[in-house]
Amino acid sequence: MITQPAIAGYALQLGDDALIMAQRLSEWISRAPELEEDVALANIALDLLGQARSLLSYAGAMAGHGHSEDDLAYFRDERDFTNLQITELALAGFGEETARLLAFSSYQAELYQRLRDSRDETLAAVAARAAKEVAYHRDHATQWVLRLGDGTEESHRRMQAGLARVWPYTAEMFRADPLGQALAAEGVAVDAAQLHPAWAGYLGPVLSEATLAWPETVAAPGGGRQGVHTEQFGHLLAEMQYLARCHPGARW
Amino acid sequence: MTGPAELAGVRAVAGQVPDPEIPVLTIADLGILRDVDLSADGRIQVTITPTYSGCPATDTISRDIAAACARHGWPDVTVRIVLSPAWTTDWLTDAGKRKLREFGTAPPARRGGPGPVPVPLSVRCPRCGSPDTREVSRFGSTACKALYACTSCQEHFDYFKAF
């Protein structure tokens, strides 16, 4: 049964993923290892923010509560966010960020590629636009993983450590979610649980070409889709929401 | 009653609105002006499509279209943004590509095949015409550009990514 609140909930999940990943990536501006990478990560964040705007606006419209994209981004609390935990992790270095970008953009690439065929016209349109963008992000991350993994001894060590840091959080991306599965059965959503083979099929050859080992890690408990988040997430929201909450209704 | 001639007039005016970030290009050159028609309530409606999801120029372009139409005697034009079908650089007109080249930005190569990331074989330097160029950065000053350098004349230049 396709209901508008169900579609709203699904759009919110994808929108929250894009929004929080955009926020984390923009923290790199002025701190990346080279100027070109500042520009690259900012551009990727901007693409994701654009996806988030479309998805949150749609979630607000379908939920019927009259919330705008800004209401949803700035005036919800921690437990109301449904993003995957991998997007919110506070990471320590460029190796870890590159590992996250590779893992997450590869997931988004598989998801959006399939969501283009959604029976929901808006989701299909957002996905058609976003599929091209995230393919470019994935390619960018791939270039870095090859360069660092098959680089010096030190860059290899850091890239492998980066994979080990984020890999426990990749399991959550493919965990069966009742909302996504119900909508997938109706041809509206993509069942993320089905994406793992394609995801691993892309990443396997990339890691082996980069002389990196596929990380053997234990899955983190997850729970982002149910509003369960890591300790650092509150800090991220504090920074992201501070201005809008101090000056409600501010325009620029 | 709004007739076809009037809609054509609005299309001409809207099409001449420059892109705020690449001002040598009009939105007609860019291929983002999709349609001019009447909405259900009888108002003239201009439909555009964004280049990239996060393109910050989209809001400015919407305002500029409404303002240009108002200046030409159509104060009540609405601008609608549609995402589908997704914009591609294949919609850039030949005139647009020529203007880009004269502006010093290499126009996008036509995309080849259905691959996920179309990579053009060679990008010609817009200043000296040499095909001997290299990619400096996959991302540039705006979402739609990458940064290249020419090995022949040593100039750096923007490349409008094939997308």
Image (cartoon, helix red, strand yellow):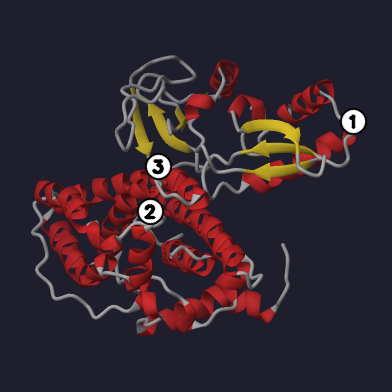
Corner quadrant of residue B132: top left
Q: Which mark is residue B120?
A: none
Residue density around tag 3, few if under 14, some if 14–19, many if 20 or more, within 10 Å? many
* Image quarter (top left, top right, bottom left or bottom right) of the N terminus of chain B: top right
Q: How many marks?
A: 3
- Alpha carbons under labels 3 and 2: distance apart: 21 Å
* First reached walking from the N terminus: tag 3 or tag 2: 3
Corner quadrant of residue B81: top right
Please say if the residues under marks 2 and 1 sit with CB atoms less than 8 Å apart.
Answer: no
**Residue bearing mark 1:** B1
Please say if the residues under marks 3 and 2 sit with CB atoms less than 8 Å apart.
Answer: no
Q: Position of residue A55 (x, y in %)?
A: 52, 59
Amino acid beneath label 3 = Lys
Marks 3, 1 in one chain: no
Amino acid beneath label 1 = Met
- Alpha carbons under labels 2 and 1: distance apart: 42 Å
Q: Which mark is residue A132?
A: 3
Q: Position of residue B76 (x, y in %)?
A: 86, 42
Any part of residue A18 in sight: yes
**Residue bearing mark 2:** A187
Q: Residue at x 40, y 25 (%)?
A: B154
Q: Position of residue A195 (x, y in %)?
A: 24, 56
Q: Is residue B58 left or right of residue B10?
A: left
- Alpha carbons under labels 3 and 1: distance apart: 41 Å
Q: Residue at x 40, y 32 (%)?
A: B148
Q: Secondary structure at mark 1?
A: loop
